[in-house]
Amino acid sequence: MDKLLIDGSPPLTGEVKISGAKNAVLPILAATLLGSSTSTISNVPHLNDVTTTMSLLARMGCTITMGDNMVVDVDPTTINDYTAAYELVRTMRASILVLGPLVARYGQAEVSLPGGCAIGARPVNLHIEGLRAMGADISIDGGYIRARAGRLQGTRIAFDMVTVTGTENLLMAAALAKGETVFENAAREPEVVDLANYLIAMGAKIEGAGTSTIHVQGVDQLMGTDYSVVPDRIETGTYLVGACVTRGKIKVRDTVPEILTSVLDKLREAGAHITTGEDWIELDMKGQRPKSVSISTAPYPDFPTDMQAQFCVLNALADGTAKVTENVFENRFMHISELQRMGADMTVDGNSVTIRGVERLKGAPVMATDLRASASLILAAFMADGQTEVGRVYHIDRGYERIEEKFHMLGAEIQRVPDR
């Protein structure tokens, strides 16, 4: 197991290239199971969760070929096993995304109840209820979801709560169902739109992706296709916050500014000077300390929960006092105690934390508790006196490609070493 050693760093400066989105590539890889021929997926980030997903598909019998620059060919026609085993999916909640495609394409699936970051309840009941409404026979036995079905039937599904993976799983299932499926209160995230665009490229008939109501007219067959994954908006936001807290100036390339509106608005409120182009964003703090900004997380297009921890760090080092309210996951303040070890002035009250900014933090040994929390600890270490040691960085390797290399290229004093 590795750890990161980080010394207080100068303002981040330079350019950084954004990788493909983790939260888009995982459902797209699952959706390749729907195809009757090979799909070629490009702009695939090199992440532990991606490796796990490809291992899962290969275990099922799919033929996986990885080319240069992480271009991945998936041939699902060789599949001979419809089980997603616990030992492969225990670290990754996105493994549930193979359930819908397997039932829709092959009429059967055995999928282990998933693991992942311990950031709160993310029940799979919405996935199961949706598939049952489409005609699947589902039971849960021995930690596995066991599903059987003939051809799924289109229906109306109104989600009780907004669910990204639930929308994605059932969207994939509906693509091959008989008749029309209508989703109400559907997730609107850009990653859902990217999945829909991939399915449309395969031949699916989908309208309304990116809105709360999605219409799917099922087709008899989907064909493999070539597709490039959307850039990662959370990785983009993380590097921008890094430049903001260190009072630097960076340009992020190969990104999509229009899917980051809520984050960019808050960075401007914090005092950042931001300019954008078709596929780039430049942030310049002009050497100034950021100002405190209150945030409240909510499903897209509002402020993303996956940027909450990074903005906690921004406020920890900002001028003023702010309140951060977490409305999506009930257990997503585990990074607060680690930031307090570094000298952050933070008080938690239920699902909110009041943060009074300080000029500098202090280096300390800290432990990553989930994916985005680990990113926040790295940002905090850049503005800490002395050295910070971040342990359990396997969390960050699930969602950030070569993070220490990219930050080092921007001037950060960061290195990965074995945790002996």
Image (cartoon, rainbow, N blue to C red):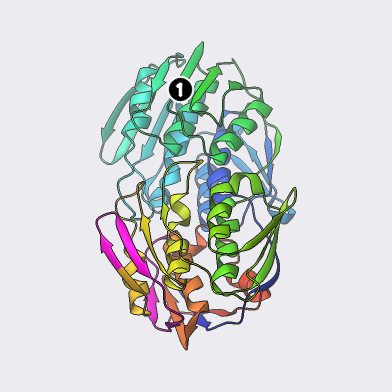
- Whether residue 4 is visible here, answered yes or no, is no
- Quarter assignment of residue 344: bottom left
Pointer 1 local density, CA inside 10 Å: few below 14, some 14–19, many at least 20: many
Image quadrant containing the C terminus? bottom left
Q: How many marks?
A: 1
Whether residue 47 sits left or right of residue 145 in the image: it is: right
What type is the residue that disc 1 sits on?
Answer: Phe
Of residues 326 and 306, the one drawn nearer to the viewer in this rendering = 326
**In the image, is residue 160 above or below residue 216?**
below
Task: Say which residue appears at 28% left-offset and 41% top-offset.
Answer: 143
**In the image, is residue 409 above or below residue 281?**
below
User: Magenta residues, as a range?
Assistant: 347-371
Of residues 228 and 76, the one drawn nearer to the viewer in this rendering = 228
**In the image, is residue 415 above or below residue 149?**
below
**Residue extending furthest bottom?**
386
Image quadrant containing the N terminus? bottom left
Task: Say which residue appears at 48% left-offset and 78% top-offset.
Answer: 381
Is residue 355 a member of the stretch shown in magenta? Answer: yes
Where residue 332 appears, x then y in whole percent?
A: 34, 56
- Quarter assignment of residue 321: bottom left
- Quarter assignment of residue 197: top right
Task: Say which residue appears at 51% left-offset and 35% top-offset.
Answer: 188
Whether residue 61 sits left or right of residue 118 in the image: it is: right
Where residue 386 appears, x then y in whole percent?
A: 47, 89
Is residue 88 a member of the stretch shown in magenta? Answer: no
Of residues 63 and 88, the one drawn nearer to the viewer in this rendering = 88
Q: Which residue is mark 1?
A: 183
- For label 1, the SS is strand
Where residue 30 appears, x then y in whole percent?
A: 53, 38
Where residue 148 appears, x then y in whole percent?
A: 38, 23
